[in-house]
Image (cartoon, rainbow, N blue to C red):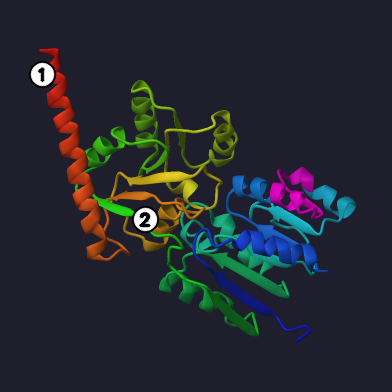
Amino acid sequence: MCGVKQLNLLIAPPGWGKTYRLLEWIKSSEGEFVFVFPLRALCEEVYLSALKKKISCLCLRNFKDQKSIPTIKPKLLITTPELARSLDLGDRIILIDEFHLFFYWGESFRESMLEFIEEHLSTSPRVILLSATIGEEVLQKTKELFGEIYEQMRIWDFGNQNLKNRPRRIVYHRSKQSVLKLLELSEAGTGLVFCQYRNEVHELVSYLRSRGKKVLGCVGGEAYEFSIKLYEEEEWDVIVATTVVSHGVNLPVIKRVYFTYVVENLDFYLQMVGRAGRDGSAYDLHTRSFLYFKPKEFLKGVLYGLGKRLSHKWQSLLYCLYES
């Protein structure tokens, strides 16, 4: 098999431990690697994990860091696709995390992601693509893009478009207002709210803070700063974000996931829902979509949501009677 160009696609559910297993393999291997992540925050997290495993590594944070590669000669090079442009990767095995984003984002607002693929993957002897969710359209594009370049294409499917840990309850909401009403009645533990637009995140963060909640927000381009701010509190009441935190950024244990809008893309939906339950603990899902889950799974959530609303109205009534 020596000299054969191989393309490998590893698909496993959120929380399966892809990164951990690959770092173990890198540590025991004699080869050299480059790990490419779509977010800088992911680069930093994996860099720290690699150091803990005592793997010789270099995390590129700017173009000046590229000059350190010949001196340090790292076993593992960690980078974003932008910083890997024009680099001589030699015979390094290329690992690409959240590969589906290279199509979703690369075809819209980050052309450099696809440019990285065109520049490097045609010359690399071995590539491993990683994702938790690969839709049929992305899979077909992958085959078309690499079909003539690689002699072998292997797909290791450990649960494509699946959740490792399903929610304890699923509460369906017809409106954004309904979601926010139950969000205010939330119990102990951190809740994660996904908004469709940046301005929604900012508005909801301001509102929840005015209600006395410990809230942290994150939108595109702020993932790295967000990951630093996470450690300012032992426990946040609510994290409000766009899809930017749906892909791998380390979060505290999430007890509830809320969607203020209807999600139509299954890949993104499962990535977002999969931010909860990564440690195997129970969590609730408040959604406005009927994707993935079976109708009977919504029944328990319907009864729960109804009970919550009735309880709130009863408490409000008792408060009014007491005040009068």
User: Viewed as shown, does residue 215 lie left or right of 51?
Assistant: left
From mark 2 to mark 1, how far is it between C-alphas? 37 Å
Give residue 91's quadrant in the image: bottom right
Question: Which residue lies at the image location 67% right of the left edge and 51% below the top edge?
Answer: 46
Mark 2 secondary-structure assignment:
loop
Q: Report x, y in % for residue 309.
A: 18, 38
Residue 62 belongs to magenta span: yes
Under mark 1, the amino acid is Leu
N-terminal of the pair, mark 2 or mark 1, is 2
Q: Residue furthest right?
A: 71
Query: How dense is the environment of label 1, judged by Cα within 10 Å: few (below 14), some, or many (20 and up)?
Result: few
Which stretch did the figure color magenta? 47-65
Question: Is residue 32 among the parts visible in the rendering?
Answer: no
Residue 1, which numbered label? Answer: none
User: Viewed as shown, does residue 28 lie left or right of 312?
Assistant: right
Q: Report x, y in % for residue 109.
A: 48, 51
Name the residue that disc number 2 marks: 167
